[in-house]
Amino acid sequence: LNAIRVSNAVMKITSNDENFAGLCPADDFPSLRNSTYLNSAGIGLIPAPVLERSSRFLSALGTYGTRSYFDHIDDIRQAPRIAAARLFGCDVQSIGLITSVAEGMSQFAWFVCPEAGQNVVVVDIDHPSAVYPWLRVAQDTGAEVRYVRVADDPLSLGVDKVAALVDRKTAVISVSHVMWTSGYRFDLEALGGLARSVGAYLAVDATQSAGVTPLDVRQMDVDFIAATGFKWLLSLAGAGICYLRPELAERMTPIMVGNNSTGAVIDRKPSGYDTSRYEFPHGAARLEYGSSAHLARYTLGGSLTYLEAVGITNIERHVIGLGDQLIAGLVQLGAEVLTPRAPEARAAIVTARFPGRDGTRLTAQLEAENVVVLPRLGGVRFSPHLFNSSADIEKALAALAKILSEAP
Ligand SMILES: Cc1ncc(COP(=O)(O)O)c(C=O)c1O
């Protein structure tokens, strides 16, 4: 850890700004002074100190090439890995750096490679990155992909619905921890137990939970977790993190190979390759076949450090409180809330439909009021993070009340 310069280079988060009820200094997110940004489920904002550090790095890399690259190699290759290991409560070797969830999940899907006669259980309102990789493998092997169907009633999603489709032929359950649509949060301990009871794997897309919800793999029976960096992890597209259960990592022959498939990848200097053979690095780093977005990885290291300094349990408490406030206000406005009320069944996303109103139009009307959200499930998805405050929720609810008081 001492080798990682990221923490002392980035920031100290010691006190809250007096006029700001988010969990961090207001100066870290300057755009919030003139807009109400409730869209971290779409794209997270990068904290100003992290952004400044990344801008300096980009400038140095573009100006000095390899001289700068080798100066920063630990910050690119190791810092995000070490910070992710702390986030997931696992050892560093169990962390892989991926470019997207689609890539990580696809690699895992080809490793599991369910055969004809086996099945994979997925959710119909889930994100393509948690579903398509299995469809693709099934296209070749003839495995069955079974859908938990809740699109007509998103609030009915639960472990019981998954359990109803799981049997001895289930090779894997693949779900998002938190649904990008309804905000429903799965109980991963319960899902892990279910998967284990039939000898299936559990693969989790944690894109909508990592950064706002504690994700300690020691407390859940999960085989693979992937999360993309540009949402709640407050970084850039092009870098994400994954956890691969250690026993599986050593058995995995990755489908993708390249200049990183050469053994001790992390410390390797490209002084020469033996192109007659490849050799996989130990642990989840074997998923890292080729070069990847340096800037995105560098930024991810900074953002993960920032999040850790604020504290994931603090963030969870904060966003659940904002969600309580939002849900209460939405109900008062006559909305149909599609996110569970129970705090343990949600993270930071709250989605609601408004009778007689179209979600896309409402989103545009909110945008005109300087409130940034996205349309989902025919309604509107709100997704506050650590930098939002109770005042932001009040502003969003007041804007909605104004819009709803006018003709559609
Ligand atoms: C649940 C979920 N998974 C994954 C992604 C992104 O996937 P990828 O990293 O594969 O582009 C998103 C958002 O774009 C998402 O909401």
Image: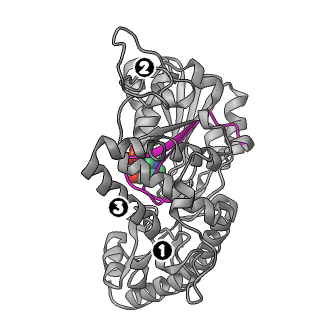
User: In the image, residue 48 lies at what x, y percent?
Assistant: 43, 70
Q: Is mark 2 within 8 Å of ligand 1?
A: no
SS of the residue under disc 1: helix
Say which of 311 and 369 sits in front: 311
Q: Are marks 2 and 3 in contact (CB under 8 Å)?
A: no
- Residue 266: which disc? none
Mark 3 crowd level (few <14, some 14–19, many ≥20, 10 Å Cα): some
Q: Is residue 140 magenta?
A: no
Which sits earlier in the primary sequence, circle 2 or circle 3?
3
Nearer the viewer's eye, disc 2 or disc 3?
3
Q: CA distance from mark 2 to mark 1?
A: 50 Å
Q: Is mark 3 within 8 Å of ligand 1?
A: no
* Residue 163 can be seen in this image: yes
Nearer the viewer's eye, disc 3 or disc 1?
3
Q: Which residues are magenta?
A: 220-244
Look at mark 2 in the image and give the residue it sits on. 142
Q: Is residue 277 above or below residue 92?
A: above
User: In the image, residue 167 lies at what x, y percent?
Assistant: 64, 27
Q: Residue at x 60, y 70 (%)?
A: 319
Name the kind of residue labelled 2 in the image.
Answer: Gly
Q: CA distance from mark 2 to mark 3?
A: 48 Å
Say which of 243 and 262 sits in front: 262
Say which of 119 and 178 sits in front: 178
- Residue 28: which disc? 1
Q: Are marks 2 and 1 in contact (CB under 8 Å)?
A: no
Q: Is residue 122 above or below residue 390?
A: above
Nearer the viewer's eye, disc 2 or disc 1?
1
Which sits earlier in the primary sequence, circle 3 or circle 1?
1
Which sits earlier in the primary sequence, circle 2 or circle 1?
1
